Each structure stands twice: as structure tokens, then as C-alpha cells.
Image (cartoon, grey):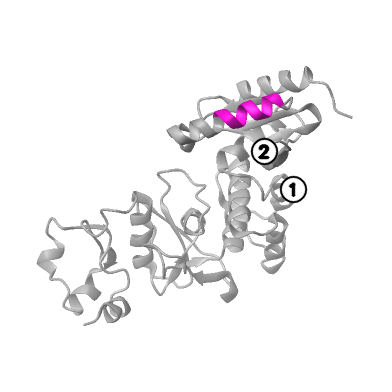
Amino acid sequence: MSSVEVLRTVPGWPVAFRGSAARSAGLVTGAELRGPRFTRPFPDVYVQLAAAAGLSEAEVRIRAAAALVDGRGVLSGYSAALLHGADCGPLDAPAEATLTRGGIRPRPGLVLHRDLLRRDEIEVVRRGGSVAGLWVTTARRTAFDLARWAPSRVERIVALDALANAGGFDPAEVLALRDRHPGARGTGALPEIVSAADRYAGSPPETRVRLALVAAGLPRPKVQWVVQDPVARRALWLDMAYPEHLVGLEYEGAAHTRPEQVLRDTARFTTLTAMGWRMLRFTKWDPPERIAGLVRAAISTSAVRP
């Protein structure tokens, strides 16, 4: 049997697949599935440990959920967001799927939704990697769902920002889906969630910082503000800024700890400071109240530009 034929008869092989299908195709025996080379996250769904060794735990959970709901639903919620390049859920988020047919119950590590999905609201992941070929809700439909389902107002905006950025669409487009699905749960607050969103937000932590500033009574900062460096003839992008005060805000994630990035950041910081900008740099260790206090102090002591 060719590799193409295997994938057609045993979707997900060799990472996460239906054990019954793999046995029928002669790829593995029941005794082997019960052995140490495999684990069973869901009924009749098996993961081959060696094949999954290079994948993250989230990818393995998603692949296993896809095998479980194959033909009865599609990946959605935070699982779909991750596959669209908008990783905005918690590290230990369970896999999520929306069922189009019955017959599957929620399990530990799996959240199931039952919502109406139109044909143009689902698609196959076509980008490369281990998740290509999986069925998911589209980026817009995923944004519509998480803007209603996420556990808090902040996380709903975080998800909408991330998906709008990754999908290249205006957050307001999810309101059209509200109109397509009258009576869908959680749509009452959708206009306010949309108004607080920004498709140019660079990352979920940046969105959380922006929302913390607004919640503290500060003006909404500009996102991805461009500063022109006339000497080097290049553009410098700030995560957030109050340009009228020449105050810039940067969120420094793990990537900024790499030696070469530290050197680039140092040169960039020096250039911006020489141009009169007051730069504030934050990390995950800075609580929202501290961030808001430092930003308030910075803009209150900076001259307002005409």
C-alpha cells in the first residue's frame, strides 16, 4: 500500500489515527497498539510515540482530536486558531472541535461544541507541516467563535486580535457572521469586543498590555507605530506608542533574549532615545498595575507635541 493510500484509508497515520482503521489496513495489530510504542488519548484513537516525538504537546492533542472527530466535525476554537498561525490560547488548552454530526461525547482533554457551521466556514489546512490536511473552521469563523467563547472579555479581544492579524482581515468582519447566525450564543457583547480589537497587534501579550492601559484610564495607544530613522533611512516599528508624547512601549518576549536580538534591540533603543523617544520595555514579569503606573508617569512628564 502506497503512502497516499495509507493516508486515505487511515487518516492521521502514523502520528494520531483510529486504531480500528489501522488494524483493518494491516498496519498494526491490536497487541502492538496495547504495547509501549503507542498511547491512547481517546477511544480508538492512538498516538505512535516515535512519530509524534518532534511535535509539541498541543499539536499531538490536536491531531488526536482530529482523528476522533473525523467525518463528524472539524477542529475549532483555540485548536483552529493555532493552526491558522494565531496561537492565543493557554499552553494547556484542551483540543477543541465543533461537531457537525452526533455520536461523540466530551472527554478529558477535549472540548466539543455544537453550532451550525456553513460550508464556507470550514476549510482544510493547506500550509506545510504536521497539521496539513486537517479540517478546521476558517480564521474568520474561529474569530467569531472565540470572540464569544473565550473565558473573559480580555481573552476574547486577544483571540480576535490574533486571528485578524494572522488572517489579514478587519475584526469588524465577524459582525457579518453574527448576522448569518442570529440567536447564536454570546453575540450580545460582540460589537464592544470588536470595537476594542486591533488587527495590527503584534502578539497576545501586546494586546493584554494595551487593554490593561485602557482599563487603567489611560488613552488607547497606537499599535505598530512607525518611526522613520532619517540617518539610516529605515523604519523602526514600535509595539505601541503615544506619539504625541514621544513615549514608546515594547513587549519583550523570549525571542528578545537571543544574543543577536539583544544586540539589535540595544542599537534600536539607542537610536530611538537619540531621536527623543522615551522607551519603556516590559516583560511577562511586569504586572498590569506597574505597567500602567510607569506609562502614566511617562506621558504626564513628556511634552505634548504640536
* Crowd tier of the residue under label 1, counting other residues whose Cα lies within 10 Å: few below 14, some 14–19, many 20 or above: few
Cα separation, mark 1 vs mark 2, equals 37 Å
From the viewer's perspective, is residue 229 above or below residue 100?
above
Task: Check the picture and name the quadrant holding the N terminus.
Answer: bottom left
Q: Measuring 71% from the left and 41% from the top, which residue is drawn there?
A: 226
Q: Is residue 104 visible?
A: no
Mark 2 falls on what kind of element?
loop
Magenta residues (range): 266-274
Q: Measuring 67% from the left and 29% from the top, which residue is drawn there?
A: 272
Q: Nearer the viewer, mark 1 or mark 2?
A: 2
Residue 7 percent coordinates (x, y): 30, 76
The residue type indicated by label 2 comes to Ala
Task: Check the picture and name the quadrant holding the C terminus.
Answer: top right
- Disc number for residue 195: 1
The residue type indicated by label 1 comes to Ser
Reading the chain from its start, which is encountered first: label 1 or label 2? 1
Q: Which residue is mark 2?
A: 232
> Which quarter of the picture shows residue 23?
bottom left
* Crowd tier of the residue under label 2, counting other residues whose Cα lies within 10 Å: few below 14, some 14–19, many 20 or above: few
* Of 306 and 72, the residue lying toward us: 306
> Which quarter of the picture shows residue 112?
bottom left
* Of 1 and 145, the residue lying toward us: 1
